[in-house]
Amino acid sequence: MDERFQPTIIIDTREPEGGGWEPFFTVPTIRVMLQTGDYGLLGAEEWISIERKALSDLIGCLSHSRERFTEELRRAQRIPEFTVIVEGTYQQLLRGDYRSQMNPKSAWESVIALQGRFKIPFLFAGSMEIAARLCESILLRWYREHEKAL
């Protein structure tokens, strides 16, 4: 890939500075406030966005912050390629490996229901590093498929 046309990943300004997934990225990044999602591509903010969730954060979004999260997913429907990437596994979700009183079956069913209702995939990556690499791969694949239009 010609470096003059190298894509730039946008990191929402509300994400931790120098933390989160940023250390794992291999392409340039820039911090910009995003309306929806935590990561995107410079110049393609309205076309692709990724929401980052630690497993504990996801559980909070499925329980006490569900209304806010549901509204965020509703807003995300206007973005053609929106994905939620979770730093955890389906097994952790099903076993209840999180600090919450939320029933694991309820958490599982909530994820399935939200994916179906909003047509937004939830990808369980297992770790922060794998989640970051998955995010970058999704963004770069989109970029390669659409770079001429950009």
Image (cartoon, rainbow, N blue to C red):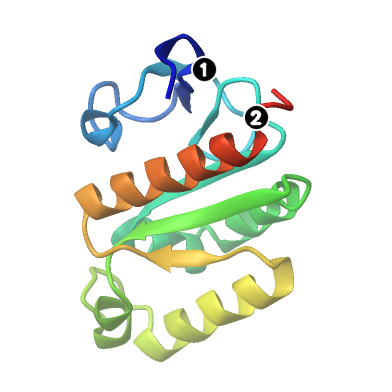
Vertical order, 28 against 22 (above or below): above
Label 2 sits on what residue type?
A: Glu
Question: Which residue is tagged 2?
Answer: 45
x and y percentages locating residue 124 in the rendered image: 36, 67
Q: Quadrant of the N terminus?
A: top left
In this view, the residue farthest toward the bottom is 105
Work out whether residue 103 or residue 48 is closer to the camera in this orientation and state it: 48
Task: Identify the residue at the far front of this view.
Answer: 2
Residue 131's place in the image compared with 110, above or below, is above
Q: Name the foreground residue: 118 vs 72.
A: 118
Question: In the rendered structure, are the residues bearing label 2 and label 1 in contact, judged by CB atoms less than 8 Å apart?
Answer: yes
Foreground tag (2 vs 1): 2
Kindly identify the residue that appears in the image at 69 percent across and 26 percent down: 148
Residue 62 image position (x, y, % from top left): 49, 68
Q: Where 20 sits versus 72, above or below?
A: above
What SS does tag 2 mark? loop
Label 1's element?
A: loop
- Which dot marks residue 43? none
Q: Residue at x 24, y 77 (%)?
A: 92
User: For mark 1, what is the residue?
Assistant: 32
Residue 4 picture location, percent across and down: 47, 9
Query: Badge 2 local density, few (<14 within 10 Å), some, or many (20+)?
Result: some
Q: Is residue 62 above or below residue 34?
A: below
Type of residue at label 1?
Val
Q: Earlier in the sequence, mark 2 or mark 1?
A: 1
Q: Where is the C terminus found, in terms of image quarters?
A: top right
Residue 72 visible here:
no
